[in-house]
Image (cartoon, rainbow, N blue to C red):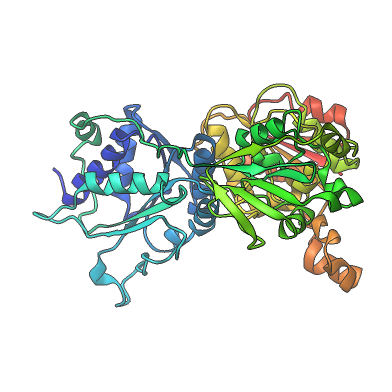
Amino acid sequence: MTTPSQQFAASVVAELVAAGVKNFYLAPGARSQALAIAAGQLAGAGKLSLTVRLDERSLAFTALGRAMSTAEPSVIITTSGTAVANLHPAILEAHHSGVPLILLTADRPAELRGIGANQTTEQIGMFGNALRGTHDVPAPRPGSTPSAKDLVATAISQSLGGAKPPGPVQLNLQFVEPLSSSEPSAVKVLAGLEKRPLEFPAASEEQIEIEVDNHTVVIAGAGAGPAAVRFAEKANLPLFAEPSSGARYGSSAITNYVQGLTTELAGEIRRVVVFGKPTLSRGVIALIKNSSVYVAKSANYGNFDIGKNVIATSWNLIPKGVAEKHWLDSWKEFEPLSEPRATLSQAIWNAPGSTPILIGASNIIRVADSCLVPRPKTVFSSRGLSGIDGSVSTAIGIAQAGAGVRALIGDLTLFHDAGSMNISGLPNLNVQLIIGNDSGGEIFRKLEVAKNISPEMLSQLFLTPQEIDIEKLCEAYGWQYFAAVNLTELNEAMKADGYVVIDYKL
């Protein structure tokens, strides 16, 4: 027996797989049952990777982490109603950081909208302008079935970018009863399709030359990559590279440029060349706003013109000229920041092996930016919106790409996403959550607010210390727990495999 719902769902999922999409994420639900069955059939046949998570918010951030690591679209399958709304935080991060996602949001038929029908809301427009494409697909019915092939081709193309950066795309799929059937098998549908690899947009050859001198520096923000290193080294320029830039290595990279920007040396800068999206340091932002600015276009982060003073942009920047040696050497004189968070950051950064690192968007990444000695590392961070939301689930998604992950996060970041520690149904992965535990939001002590209110009010409204036992939390969710108060204990704990929490007391 077959139904139009199952026939269409099998075609959609099979077409995605045939086009080279491999990673699927599912939260249980009734309206999406045909999609779930199709994904389950193909997963059982080894044709796709399927992850099932209990709640949609954790699901979406896990999918985000996988797509961040692979640059390939993750497919998210949800039922209707608030299930779709729970994707929103991850969708916003994907939008602002250029991460490809394809949302298969099941919906009730359009005729039920606006009349009080159960579990029915307006799912089109729910994500505002955060999508690369939105497609409201009528319910398949006898004699009337939408073209799955055309929908899938459009969704993949939009998610991978081109004219726009990569990002999330929504296929809002309406279904009517009966919602599923045992046939057709999505495996059989796939067998009849032509297999093809993912088609990524071609890189642009557009380029411009930029004059450089002893008053020029290179700034590498999130996603900058090796192009920033090549430019800086070719021109013998100081390179200010954030930890998640993919450019914090090489002979031009400066360890503690943040300190340098507080000295008279910063006043000698006249021109900056920007790669990626730099957002960590107020000093860097002030520098950009008060300099002549040239920007390398970013395939993921889009337009960057925070001071509205960019002179020129291009996909490829070529330096014209070479700075004198003393200009670069003068920036290397600043010693790495020294404090407990710096010690923790350096230990993880210097740990042997090639395990990817995820750094949470809190005080810890700013400390890391002032102390990590340049060296090649694979580092991720949610710099699209710089939020702490979903950090645990994002780490799990990164680990699914195959190399494990070490996530350096604060205690509030852990508690914010504690529900994602539910690893029921997940395979064995090497996920280390290393907690810089300072019992609250210490980042706020560095902001204006700390000078404007009493210590008691600061604690209540901003530091928000939590009375949560991390060890018992780990016990409840099945994670290994290690407490560490020094580097010896930390290094020993980092040898553990599996799902691990290391509670490092600051």
Left or right of 381? Residue 75 is left
Could you tell me if residue 235 is visible in this image? yes
- Write the residue at 46% across / 38% down: 205
Residue 191: quadrant of the picture: top left
The front one of 174 and 197 is: 197
- Write the residue at 48% across / 48% down: 54
Could you tell me if residue 424 is visible in this image? no
The single residue placed furthest to the top in the displayed view is 353
Residue 346: quadrant of the picture: top right
Number of numbered discs visible in the structure rendering: 0
Left or right of 385? Residue 171 is left
Position of residue 453 relative to residue 39, above or below, is below
Residue 184: quadrant of the picture: top left
Quadrant where the C terminus sits is: top right
The front one of 166 and 392 is: 166
Instruction: Indicate the position of residue 480 as horizontal and vertical percent values.
Output: 69, 33
The front one of 74 and 107 is: 74
Instruction: Indicate the position of residue 308 as horizontal and vertical percent values.
Output: 63, 63
Quadrant where the N terminus sits is: top left
The front one of 461 and 241 is: 241
Position of residue 165 relative to residue 332, above or below, is below
- Write the residue at 23% across / 42% down: 11
- Write the residue at 21% across / 41% down: 182
Instruction: Indicate the position of residue 476 as horizontal and vertical percent values.
Output: 65, 43
Instruction: Indicate the position of residue 209 as horizontal and vertical percent values.
Output: 60, 41
Position of residue 326 relative to residue 497, above or below, is below
The single residue placed furthest to the bottom in the displayed view is 115
